[in-house]
Image: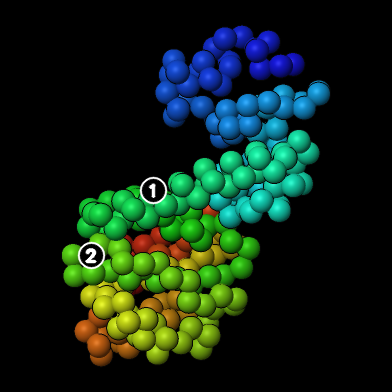
Amino acid sequence: MLLKDLPPDARPREKLLARGAGALSDAELLALLLRTGLPGKNALQMGQEMVDTFGGVAGLLHTGPDALKSIKGLGPAKRAEIVAVLELARRALAEELKEKTLFSTPQAVRDYLQLQLGSRPHEIFAVLFLDSQHRLIALEELFRGTLTQTSVYPREVVVRALALNAASVVLAHNHPSGAAKPSRADEALTQTLKAALALVDVRVLDHFVVTSTQAVSMAELGLL
């Protein structure tokens, strides 16, 4: 069935114009980007295939043009357009955090970290470096692999904080397992980094444990 053969209130474009983008599913939004499908598979079905294949929009955010080749019917132009839109989403959140005080928009921080780290297949330790007004200077991914207290080097975090003239930092790492509860090792690592950064007068404001569905604040849990 072609999209034009669907009832008017079920067509993604008409639904968006009538009810707003928030009323559309992930597959429907992707269908609007795709515009056309294949014989026997309309754009909405292709959008749903992408959602299913990559684990939702969170998975798509970390999917490059080569991985998109697995979806039959996505040519170079469509792949490039999808990757461009996803990159714009990341940059929009980053710009918001650079222009505003970080903790005036706590949900934006969580969204940004989930976009950056939530669907990675391996563990990533990242640091948000902030200025004296708690605005984002940069997010840097400093370590990857199996994170332990000994595989994250405090000296390197301190060196980057000094190089960027950061006044404070927010730590973040992902749990690919999907379990967002901080571990004892996470707590120990946080205290080690907090002590090291305090020596150069850089505060650790929070440490987030990130999955594809949530970002848990250790400060809110009283673990900082």
Identify the residue at horizontal 36%, vertical 86% (top origin).
159
Looking at the picture, which amino acid does disc 1 mark? Ala
**Outermost residue toward the left in this view:** 133
Quarter assignment of residue 191: bottom left
Numbered badge on residue 145:
none
Q: Which residue carries the number 1 mark?
A: 92
Label 2's element? loop
Numbered badge on residue 134:
2
Provide residue 88's location: percent of width, then percent of height. Answer: 46, 47
Q: Nearer the viewer, residue 81 or 175?
A: 81
Residue 111 in the figure: left or right of residue 61: left
User: Measured along the vertical axis of the image, is residue 128 above or below residue 62?
Assistant: below
Label 1's element? helix
Q: What is the spatial separation of the Cα atoms under label 2 and label 1, in whole angstroms?
A: 18 Å
Identify the residue at horizontal 81%, vertical 23% (top origin).
40
Colour pattern: rainbow
Provide residue 145's location: percent of width, then percent of height. Answer: 60, 76
User: Measured along the vertical axis of the image, is residue 81 above or below residue 108?
Assistant: above
Looking at the picture, which amino acid does disc 2 mark? His
Identify the residue at horizontal 35%, vertical 85% (top origin).
158
Query: Which quadrant is the N terminus positioned in?
Result: top right
Provide residue 153's location: percent of width, then percent of height. Answer: 46, 87
